[in-house]
Amino acid sequence: MIDKQSPLPIYYQIEKDLKDRIERGEWQEGHMIPSEREYAEHYNVSRMTVRQAITNLVNDGFLRRQRGKGTFVASKKIQQKMVRLTSFTEDMKQRNMIATTKVLSFTLMKADSLTAALFQMNEGEEIAEVQRMRLADGLPMALETSKLNLRLLQGITEKVIQHSLYDYIEHTLNLKVGAAVQKLEASVARQHESALLQITKGSPVLLMTRETKLKDGQVFESVKSVYRGDRYAFVMEMNREG
Ligand code: GLP
């Protein structure tokens, strides 16, 4: 119910009303919600106000707009626990989803001073930079740009990285992936990212950077991933001890 005397903004009240219906299960995944016009008439508020509420819920991943069709309750976000060091392929498999990869670019280049220091190699030594689109059940989830240490990852080709990199490292090269330092930040989709991820420019995304080492401590990748904010949530488990 909308209370026009409330200090809470009206868009916020509508947003809460819609969200409650989804969370209570009154509206299930795929349910088409009433149109902006219907809502505006029902609550006697402007369409702009309703649009604001809906846009917020689309950005938060509760609703999805389908051009020319309407607005629907979206599927639940993928919740990714940050406990074990896993690969994209493993993460999707664990949810019974099929991971696929589209290689957007594969470039051999000379390491700049920062990358050389990270990979403990000489500046100018050859590395690979790879841009991959990661999909789950055919839907774009993330865009990944990886710098790869070719001294350690031998035989890496465009074909190899169409599949799981970690699988190649562990089962073809017989090396052991060890540990990673990962950083997660909020950001918005840039023009080229939004086109590839099929979201509108300026939509929220999660920016993740990861530097990963083999068991022996040598860094083999430095990765920047842009995850769709409406499809992904990272969950951290924390212990007070230790
Ligand atoms: C995740 C990480 C990347 C890592 C990738 C490996 O997406 N963010 O840093 O390179 O997993 O995944 P896969 O083995 O499926 O290629």
Image (cartoon, grey):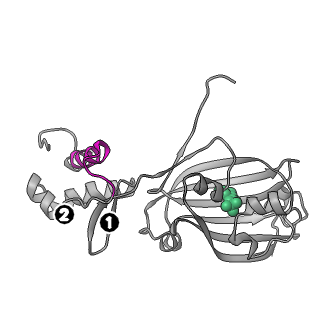
Compared with residue 84, is residue 35 higher up or lower down, i.e. above or below?
below
Provide residue 77's location: percent of width, then percent of height: 45, 52
Question: Could you tell me which quadrant the N terminus lies in?
Answer: top left
Ligand 1's quadrant: bottom right
Q: Is residue 223 visible?
A: no
Residue, disc 1: 65
Whichever of callouts 2 and 1 sits on the residue coming sooner in the sequence is: 2
Residue, disc 2: 35
Residue shown at the point (78%, 71%) measured from the top left: 128
Q: Residues within 10 Å of mark 2 (few under 14, many from 20)?
A: some
Q: What's the distance in space between the residues labelled 2 and 1, CA to CA?
A: 11 Å
Q: Residues within 10 Å of mark 1 (few under 14, many from 20)?
A: some
For residue 178, side relative to residue 183 (left or right): right
Query: Which quadrant holds residue 56?
Result: bottom left
Q: Residues in magenta?
A: 13-29
- Amino acid type of the residue that numbered disc 2 sits on in the rendered structure: Ser
Helix, strand or loop at mark 2: loop
